[in-house]
Image (tube, helix red, strand yellow):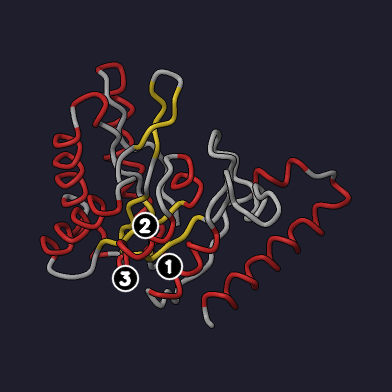
Amino acid sequence: MHAPYPVFVPGPDRERQNAYTMENVIPKSFYFAGFMEIPYMVIHPWKLQYHLGKEVEIQKNFEYFRSLISMARENNVVICLENLYEGQAGRIVEGVCADPHEASALIDRLNEEAGEERFGFCLDTGHMNLVGRDAYEMVTTLGNRLKILHIHDNDGIGDLHQMPFTFRSEGVADIGVDWEGFIRGLRDIKFDGTLSFETFPCMNSFPELVKDQALRTIAEIGEYLRNEICI
């Protein structure tokens, strides 16, 4: 499950929105997840580093997610943070949790605070590609913290949410996601979770009469990834 986002937006004009999201939307999301017995819920961390600095961003995220431990425990939910990007001066730059080492440290700190595994990670392959992070290093650094995947591809410029292997030239992923490194990483950490695709926007590229075929292609790519990971 993915909770509504953003949870927090800096600025005095966003105080009412932030309060409503944190006090109403997120608690209701936990209730729905618990009611439907959903084990994992993605909650976007706060983007603060380009406003207040990275140290403040990490601390504020720790404090906020620590405040959710009791709700997560009551509803038997593992909270998953996601790697994000930001736009600054017309450029795509790293956002919160884009660095797998920093993200891992934050998750470990939160789980230590919870006294159990109550936090994990959602790896968004498109966001990873936009900020130029190495797929194999990202996956293997996160290791068993990795619980959820948002699988999709892009050209390194826009968050296009296309199907994997779209941006290849003669079999080489020169601008898109390094799918070979991604597969190898998941194989090495013995990932046994769900291969979840976030590719719906690519359906808008196809005429209505061939959308079923496009969906079948995405499903077949999923089968391919599964077979390669489970070798």
Specify few, some or many for label 3: CA neighbours under 10 Å numbering under 14, 14-19, or 20 or more: some
Q: Mark 1 points at which residue?
A: 185
Q: In this view, does 220 lie to the left or right of 187?
A: right
Q: Name the residue under label 3.
A: 144
Circles 1 and 2: CB atoms closer than 8 Å: yes
Real-space Cα distance between discs 3 and 2? 12 Å
Q: Where is residue 159 in the image (x, y as percent from the top left)?
A: 54, 38
Camera-side residue: 98 or 181? Answer: 181
Q: Residue 228 carries which label?
A: none
Camera-side residue: 20 or 3? Answer: 3
Specify few, some or many for label 1: CA neighbours under 10 Å numbering under 14, 14-19, or 20 or more: many
Circles 3 and 2: CB atoms closer than 8 Å: no
Q: Is 157 rendered above or below residue 185?
A: above
The kind of residue tagged 1 is Gly
Residue located 14% across and 58% down the image? 109
Q: Is residue 7 left or right of residue 62?
A: right
Camera-side residue: 94 or 151? Answer: 94
Task: Say how many tags the image has.
Answer: 3
Residue located 44% across and 66% down the image? 36
Q: Is mark 3 on a helix, strand or loop?
A: helix
Q: Name the residue under label 2.
A: 138
